[in-house]
Amino acid sequence: MINVMNNKILNILEYINPNRFFGPIFMKELIISSRRRRNYFVRFLYPIILSVFVLFFFSTSLAQNDQYSSVIQASKMAQIGSYLTTSIVWFQFIFVQILAIAMLSTAISDEIYQKTLGVLMTTPISSFQIVFGKLLSKLFQLILLIAISFPVLAIIRVFGGVPWSYVLSSICVTLTTAIFAGSLSLFFSIYSHQSHRVISRVLGTYFFIYVIPRIAQHFLNIFGKANLSAYISKLYFFNPFMLMQTMQNVMQSPTSTRGFNGWVSHCIAILGFSLVILLWSCFSVRKVGLKQITGQGGLLLTRKERNVADKKQKYNYNKKQDYGKIRAIKLPPVIWREFSNSLVKTNNIMFVFSIILAVAFIITAYSLCIYYEVLNEKVTHVIFVLVYFFIGLLRTSTFASTSITTEREARSWPILLTTALRPKDISYGKIIGSCFRAWPYWFLLAAHMIVFIPLGMIKVAVLIPMTVLVISSALLVSSIGVMFSSICKRSTTAATWNMITFLTLIIPVCCIPFFYFGSPLFAAASIFGVWGGYFEMIDSFHSSPSSPLYIIEIIVASHFSFIIYSIIYMIITYIAYGLSINHMRWRILD
Amino acid sequence: MIETKHLTKVFGNLTAVDDLNLFIKQGDIFGFIGPNGAGKTTTMRILVTLMEPTRGHAIIDGLDVSRNGQKVRRVIGYMPDFMGVYDDLKVFEYLEFFAAAFSIERSKRKSIVEGVLELTDLQSKKAATVDSLSRGMQQRLGLARVLIHDPKVLILDEPASGLDPRARIEIRELLRELKRMGKTIMISSHILSELEEICDHVGIIEHGQLVYSGTIEEIRPRLGIHTKVRVQVADNQEKAIELLSALPQIHQVQTNKNYISISFKEGENIDGLIARTLVNANLDVIAIQPEQIKLDDAFLQLTKGIVH
């Protein structure tokens, strides 16, 4: 009898064994994850950040509550509980998505790069098992992180005012959104080796599906197409950000008696979309894997596709015979090398498409400003400048963080180190080269200022402090990027660490004043005088703005802080530069 | 030209290079042989300044590599066991990039690049992108890169690995040409027969220790390996075997389809004795030919094949 029971239990366990569905890939990924220190670090860091976040909101809410009597304070505890819960839920919603995107950004590309995907194709493992095994192993870790917040949410419920249905629905929405984000990241990782490119593509897709409909709706309202606008608003059902906001509004509404029920169908729909992406990924993984093992895609192609491929090959062959122009090296070699990594890839459809999209978006943005008659407003230019400044810094930072790791991956790094170039020449070249390489992004900022200064919409006096700030900030993020690139083994790791540092530096951590005031974005905004109104103040003191000391006086009197920032940035730049030199000969064996 | 004195490199519990003493004369081609994980690449990486030794010294052209890294890099040309290329550059740009990295004046770069392209027979490919080259051509490009600053010493880690026979022969010829130009070359390879043909000296390393260093000819007596002679007679091979086996100087007689293989101790002048013995017995001798000792034999005898 016991034996029969045991056999039945074993049969059930065998039936639900994840290996049955997801094959050895799932277990392999779990084993590898258990050996990676960074996963333990994330599990350690996540509750700490969550606790700091909760403590900050809790202390702020209590401080605001102090002015009331103890009776009112007690009655307001439910409200505090509600705010705390929503802040945790939002924190989790964003953080888990970021982690899902980052974790799966190299899921397939690693297998392709290490040439193991082709080998997997020769085993009985199916592409379904590869894709779902990868996804679920990461999802496992995300569920673990979400579970960490359960005790905190349970304690906050003591305050009252937070229905369980809200907590449950938000967790489900968070999880399905993370699955969707992870599926997108996994899909893009089939086509790109570098994780930052995958992350950019996921964010681009987010922009497309979440932001573009909103802009389109805005335009339709302007042109009086209310019917079409209403039609587009139905798409908001699929937007988890909008859904989270709606659920929060319903929960915090004093008149609401029951929660928002639309989340169940939303989650099912998002899971459906994720499934489509994953099945598409399965097909693509198989195609890429077979291509890798056979060395060509001929076996997979239809006759029509083969003809197209043959024509393309013939074209490329002819193109290769026509070798084109050889570029002369007129700059120091490392700077030239960075700069020669051309951004302009006219043969890449995605690149051309991105350029068209970016130009269309910029024209739309300026058109909207003209339509709403806000182009003359100071705040409009502050926003434009901050956006361009942020993009410029982000790209400089990304280029820098992969400048050395890509050489390691291409195995050209030891060769460069055995040339007569000194480590300081290489580090300096990489820092300056990364800044140069991001010139098209900086050009946007420069063009905006060049156009609007003569029109009198931007004060000419901001030119000098802005130039100094741009140079010092670009050097800062570039040197930090090169430092991480020098220390880390892989581009993915370097780009991730650099991104974390960059965001810490750029997005001010409100509770730490130094970071807040040290942020280049804050500095840029203060130069434009949006909060201080410096220029108006100084204009009012000067009857003659053409005074020769005018600009110097503005810089010294009104923008003393930016000089301090710039000096601090240069000091950090120098330290990062030194560290990159010291770590240059690390990991040569990799 | 190249010297190591008690060179030692330790990684944690692993001693990759253990008290290594080497000496390579100027103008020599030195073959560095050893099983996988024996410490060849680590030794080479120390010599080319990519690594610091834990103990001991490495000296190239009178310069200590640990103390004079910058000067040493101008004297050496290093080709690693993998072809690290900037695949989006053209061949000419790639070489000019390294010429600039060695601070060669811009006015001289073009002629120097043209020169190494001619030497490596890559002129027709100078405007091709590096990634469009075949493996053999990429290896030749690697050699061209190494020569761009006219170094005295070339350190080549497995330059012929993964190449087809034609490409291997081309690389071998190129190395001979470089030797004629007076370069000192240290070369590691697993294709022992190739080293045998081009190297003046060989060093066999195992467990980070040098188990043999010297010429290929010196290996035989030092290891007590028997010298072999091939004898071919017109007919009556059985009688010849009987007569030769009876000679006390001969260690072993083996028969093959067309010839007799005779092994004897190094130092014995036995060719005359064999000829006399066979002619006196009225046998028609077609050929008496010494058999070359194979480097593979020495390698197998000297190494145990145990890796770290």
Image (cartoon, grey):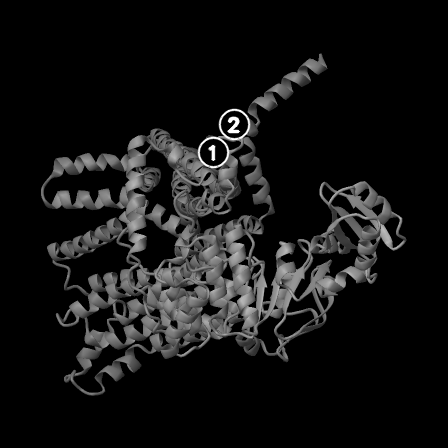
Q: Residue at x 81, y 52 (%)?
A: B279
Q: Position of residue B26 (x, y in %)?
A: 63, 75
Can residue A154 be seen in this snapshot? Answer: no
Can residue A469 be seen in this snapshot? Answer: yes
Q: Which quadrant of the view contains residue B112?
A: bottom left
Q: Amino acid at mark 1?
A: Phe
Q: Chain of mark 1?
A: A
Q: Position of residue B21 (x, y in %)?
A: 73, 70
Q: Which quadrant of the view contains residue B60?
A: bottom right
Q: Which mark is residue A7?
A: none
Secondary structure under tag 1 reads: helix
Q: Quadrant of the C terminus of chain A?
A: bottom right
Please state if A519 lies on the left or on the right of B285 as rendered: left
Secondary structure under tag 2 reads: helix
Extreme bottom residue here? A548
Please state if A368 lies on the left or on the right of A260 as rendered: left
CA separation in Å, label 2 and label 1: 9 Å
Extreme top residue here? A1
Picture layout, residue A550 above or below residue B50: below
Picture layout, residue A112 above or below residue B210: above
Q: Amino acid at mark 2?
A: Phe
Q: Position of residue B231 (x, y in %)?
A: 75, 50
Find disc 2 in the rendering and name its residue: A21
* Crowdedness near tag 2: few (<14), some (14–19) or many (≥20) residues, C-alpha within 10 Å: some
Q: Position of residue A4 (x, y in %)?
A: 68, 13
Q: Residue at x 45, y 45 (%)?
A: A109
Find disc 1 in the rendering and name its residue: A132
- Which numbered disc flags the more N-terminal residue, 2 or 1? 2
Please state if A409 lies on the left or on the right of B34 as rendered: left
The answer to which of B292 and B187 lies nearer the viewer is: B292
